[in-house]
Amino acid sequence: MTEPQHPRQTRQRAALETLLDELPGFLTAQEWHSELNRRGTKVGLATVYRTLQSLTEAGEVDMVRTPEGLAAYRACSTGHHHHLICRGCGKTVEVELPDFERWADAAAKQYGFADIDHELELFGLCGDCRA
Amino acid sequence: MTEPQHPRQTRQRAALETLLDELPGFLTAQEWHSELNRRGTKVGLATVYRTLQSLTEAGEVDMVRTPEGLAAYRACSTGHHHHLICRGCGKTVEVELPDFERWADAAAKQYGFADIDHELELFGLCGDCRA
DNA sequence: CTTTGTGCAAAGGCTTTGCATGCTT
DNA sequence: AAGCATGCAAAGCCTTTGCACAAAG
């Protein structure tokens, strides 16, 4: 049993973590990559993929699947929540649904299921895009 | 404005529709393809993809994304419902959640979102796999 | 006969991986 | 100095598409 390995502090990882804290929405690995390079930080695409995976496993980043099956990532705040995602501009809101877990558990239990997990995303049009 | 085009009745499409009615679970396009061929019905993979898409657009088939981002399909009964999927054996149950749409609408409206759609899947362990 | 469906193979797009090099520690 | 991280390019996988042929209406 060795110490839990801390990832090394590299320019690329730092840049990505900073960017994750700045931009609130869900972006794909390729979009994070473009955004980094657009800001002048040269980072390889493979590195972005590897770093996002690493951060996801570490629980510092949230991954969801878009309806197209792409992986999209964002920094996650603590606590369990769901996402409300604008179809128009991609803006995302974290939605607390306090009753949902209990309710899902209860619903599943009626079918003999236990140990319930769930994936829930809401998609809609935000006020700006609706205007 | 012409009549709504009915798809042509072909051996391949019939075989897939029959199989969809027989197997209750979610399978990927490739899995449906394998299953067809395993049963002696030779159908091209591209045809399976195209037919599943066509059936999905026609509302006769349900598509969900697996956590890996793969598209998985199954015949769907009428009415909107969600899925309760066993992590152990893949068994799926259709769950009617009558209050959910209203509730999701209300929750989203608080954030100025409208025209809400959602994706909800529940994952758990069924009675058999729990034994 | 006309139109749509099929099959095959090739192309596309996202993601992962192998390997040599550079940077952290 | 040792080892993980990076970059690039190549490979992998799922899925879509182009095209010629077959089948349905």
Image (cartoon, coloured by chain):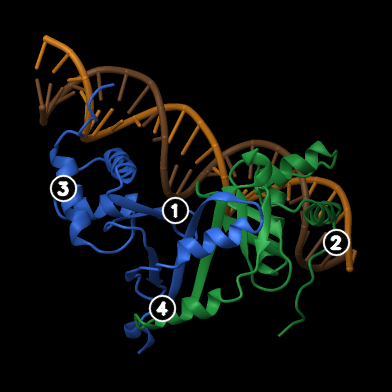
Chain colours: A green, B blue, C orange, D brown
Q: Position of residue A122 (x, y in %)?
A: 55, 57
The disc label shown at residue B70, or none: 1
Measure the C-alpha gap from mark 3 to mark 1. 23 Å
Which mark sits nearer the N-terminus, 3 or 1?
3
Q: Which residue is mark 2?
A: A9
Q: Nearer the viewer, residue A41 or A1?
A: A41
The disc label shown at residue A108, or none: 4
Measure the C-alpha gap from mark 4 to mark 3. 33 Å
Q: Is the C-beta separation of discs 4 and 3 under 8 Å? A: no
Rate crowding at label 2 as few (under 14), some (14 to 19) or many (20 or more) other CA atoms within 10 Å.
few
**Three-letter residue code for mark 2:** Gln
**Three-letter residue code for mark 3:** Ala
Q: Position of residue B58 (x, y in %)?
A: 29, 42
Which mark sits nearer the N-terminus, 2 or 4?
2
Q: Does residue B49 sit above or below A62 in this rendering?
A: above
**Three-letter residue code for mark 1:** Leu
Q: Position of residue D25 (x, y in %)?
A: 10, 27
Measure the C-alpha gap from mark 1 to mark 2. 34 Å
User: What chain does mark 2 sit on?
Assistant: A
Q: Is the C-beta separation of discs 3 and 1 under 8 Å? A: no
Q: Nearer the viewer, residue A61 or A110?
A: A110
Label 1 sits on a secondary structure element that is loop
Q: Does residue B10 sit above or below A13 in this rendering?
A: above
Q: Which residue is mark 3?
A: B15
User: What chain does mark 3 sit on?
Assistant: B
User: What chain does mark 4 sit on?
Assistant: A
